[in-house]
Image (cartoon, grey):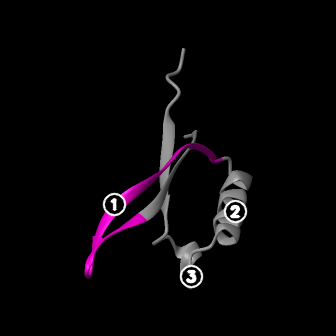
């Protein structure tokens, strides 16, 4: 029996999809586009990211598909 492997992608506000301003609409468009390629969301969370003048929350989405 062949071992099935998974492939993972991390989608964040710094992804190419959000070259302008991050928005829920752009996030939805990105997720739907990746879904057409076989990706599915397996986790989502907000992470504290260091920045100028303190930290900020950034959305992070983990996606998975069969390799």
Depth order, front residue of 20/3: 20
Magenta span: chief secondary structure: strand
Is the C-beta separation of discs 3 and 2 under 8 Å? no
Answer whether residue 35 is magenta in the image.
no
Tell me where residue 50 appears, x and y as whole percent.
Answer: 27, 69
Q: Residue furthest front?
A: 53
Q: State which quadrant residue 19 falls in.
A: bottom right
Distance (Cα) linking label 1 and label 3? 18 Å
Tell me where residue 38 appears, x and y as whole percent.
Answer: 68, 47
Q: State which quadrant residue 31 falls in.
A: bottom right
Q: Which mark is residue 28?
A: 2
Tell me where residue 67 appears, x and y as whole percent.
Answer: 55, 40
Judge whether 27 appears above or below 46 on screen.
below
Dot 2 lies on which element?
helix
At 34% from the left and 60% from the top, the residue drawn is: 48
Tell me where residue 53 appears, x and y as whole percent.
Answer: 25, 81
**1 or 2: tag closer to the N-terminus:** 2
Q: Which mark is residue 21?
A: 3
Is the C-beta separation of discs 1 and 2 under 8 Å? no
Judge whether 10 appears above or below 54 on screen.
above
Depth order, front residue of 35/29: 29
**1 or 3: tag closer to the N-terminus:** 3
- Looking at the figure, which quarter contains the N terminus? top right
Residue span colored magenta: 39-57
Within-10-Å neighbours for mark 3: few <14, some 14–19, many 20+: few
Q: Which mark is residue 48?
A: 1
């Amino acid at each position: 029996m062949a071992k099935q492997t998974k492939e993972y992608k991390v989608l964040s506000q710094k992804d190419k999809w959000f070259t302008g301003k991050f928005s829920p609409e752009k996030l939805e468009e990105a997720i739907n586009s990746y879904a057409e390629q076989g990706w599915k969301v397996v986790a989502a969370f907000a992470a504290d990211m260091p920045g100028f003048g303190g930290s900020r929350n950034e959305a992070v989405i983990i996606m998975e598909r069969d390799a």
